[in-house]
Image (cartoon, rainbow, N blue to C red):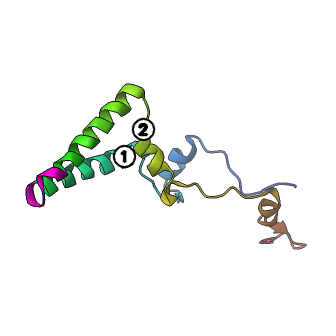
Amino acid sequence: GAGIDTAYVLTGGVPGFAAAGGDVVRGKTRWDLERQVRLAAGSLVVLGLAGGKFVSPKITLLAGAIGAGLTFSAATNTCAMGQAISAMPWNKAAKEPTRESAILQLPVRAAGNEVTAA
């Protein structure tokens, strides 16, 4: 018949398949943007405090600036640091395939009823 002969409908979906011992291929995990912002803000505060202690007291202004930025962010429900981090290359999604490239990647059924890559 037409279609895919090896497709199954599984009770429980992907988690059920994994629980039954199936091999689930997962992509790379990424940190949520909020987590990245917390890491950046916390790191800058620590750097500001350490720099103020060991380099120059004026560097503690960095910690104060980050605190002021976090306060402004909460009050206005905006996040300039989040916008900047979201533009980083590791936060860019993979490009969507075109219709033509997706069709070219579909398997083709050969005369012997075998599936081969296009």
Residue 19 on image: x %, y %:
47, 49
Label 1: which residue?
A: 37
Quick one: quadrant of the C terminus?
bottom right
Label 2: state its secondary structure: loop
Cβ–Cβ under 8 Å for marks 2 and 1: yes
In three-dimensional space, the C-alpha distance between marks 2 and 1, rounded to whole angstroms, equals 9 Å
Residue 6 on image: x %, y %:
72, 57
Residue 43 lies within the magenta run = no
Label 1: state its secondary structure: helix
Q: Look at label 2 and name its amino acid.
A: Cys
Label 2: which residue?
A: 79
The image quadrant of residue 110 is bottom right
Q: Residue at x 54, y 50 (%)?
A: 17
Q: Is residue 51 left or right of residue 69?
A: left
Residue 116 on image: x %, y %:
79, 72
Instruction: Depth check: give the residue in front, 23 or 89.
Output: 89
The image quadrant of residue 76 is top left
In the displayed structure, would residue 54 be above or below residue 36?
A: below
User: Magenta region's main secondary structure?
Assistant: helix
Residue 100 on image: x %, y %:
83, 61
Residue lying at the far right of the rendered structure = 111
Q: Sequence-wise, which precedes: disc 2 or disc 1?
A: 1
Q: Nearer the viewer, mark 2 or mark 1?
A: 2
The image quadrant of residue 111 is bottom right
Mark 2 neighbour density, 10 Å: few (under 14) some (14–19) many (20 or more): some
Mark 1 neighbour density, 10 Å: few (under 14) some (14–19) many (20 or more): many
In the displayed structure, would residue 14 be above or below residue 25?
A: above
The boundaries of the magenta stretch are: 53-59
Quick one: quadrant of the N terminus?
bottom right
